Image (tube, helix red, strand yellow):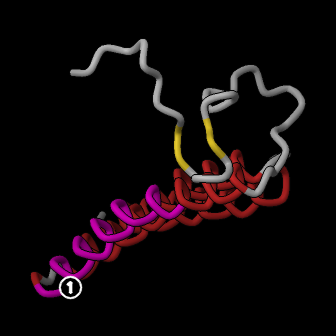
Amino acid sequence: MIDLITLFFLFSGSLLILIAGIGILRMPDVFMRASAVTKAGTVGVGLILTGFIIYYLDFELSARSLAIVLFIAITSPVGAHMIGRAAYIMGDKLWEATVRDDLKGKFDPEKHEIKSNENEDQS
């Protein structure tokens, strides 16, 4: 029974990582590519390592696997955000079907920061 549960986690994680790889090829702009890879890749690695934890049932392996999952869950979104920010600063075009650009008109490309809006309440 443990073998079937492990197989489920390993297969599900591998499938999500495959979807992340396809997302890199199919998504129209860098922002959507970063989003697809971050979400599917992080969950995929988490599922694969969960399968390893269930199969081996070893405390040391479990602790290391959980540390890896935690590290990836923390660093992957931050890395994707920084890549997206760099792409926006460099002027990478948004996909033509993008509905909303929250930074349009608010970003100062010379200072690389969001322009302060004096009309907003200072909380």
The residue under the point 30% across, 14% down is 121
Q: Identify the residue under disc 1.
A: 61
Image position of 8 (left or right of 51): right
Q: Indicate the amino acid at tag 1.
A: Leu
The residue under the point 58% across, 53% down is 111
Residue 48 is one of the magenta-drawn residues:
no
Quadrant for the C terminus, please.
top left
Depicted 14 relative to depicted 102: above or below: below
Quadrant for the N terminus, please.
bottom left
Rendered image quadrant of residue 55: bottom left
User: Residue most toward the right?
Assistant: 96
Rendered image quadrant of residue 18: bottom right
Residue 64 is one of the magenta-drawn residues:
yes
Q: Which residues are magenta?
A: 60-79
Depicted 51 relative to depicted 37: above or below: below
**SS of the residue under disc 1:** helix
Viewer-proximal residue, 60 or 91? 91
Q: Position of residue 83 (x, y in %)?
A: 61, 61
The residue under the point 62% across, 32% down is 103
- Residue count near mark 1 (Cα–Cα under 10 Å), binned few <14, some 14–19, many ≥20: some
User: Residue most toward the bottom?
Assistant: 60
Please, what is the dominant secondary structure of the magenta stretch?
Answer: helix
Q: Position of residue 100 (x, y in %)?
A: 70, 22
Image position of 69 (left or right of 92): left
Depicted 119 relative to depicted 12: above or below: above
Q: Position of residue 122 (x, y in %)?
A: 26, 21
Q: How many marks?
A: 1
Viewer-proximal residue, 52 or 41? 41
Viewer-proximal residue, 25 or 63? 25
Q: Position of residue 110 (x, y in %)?
A: 66, 52
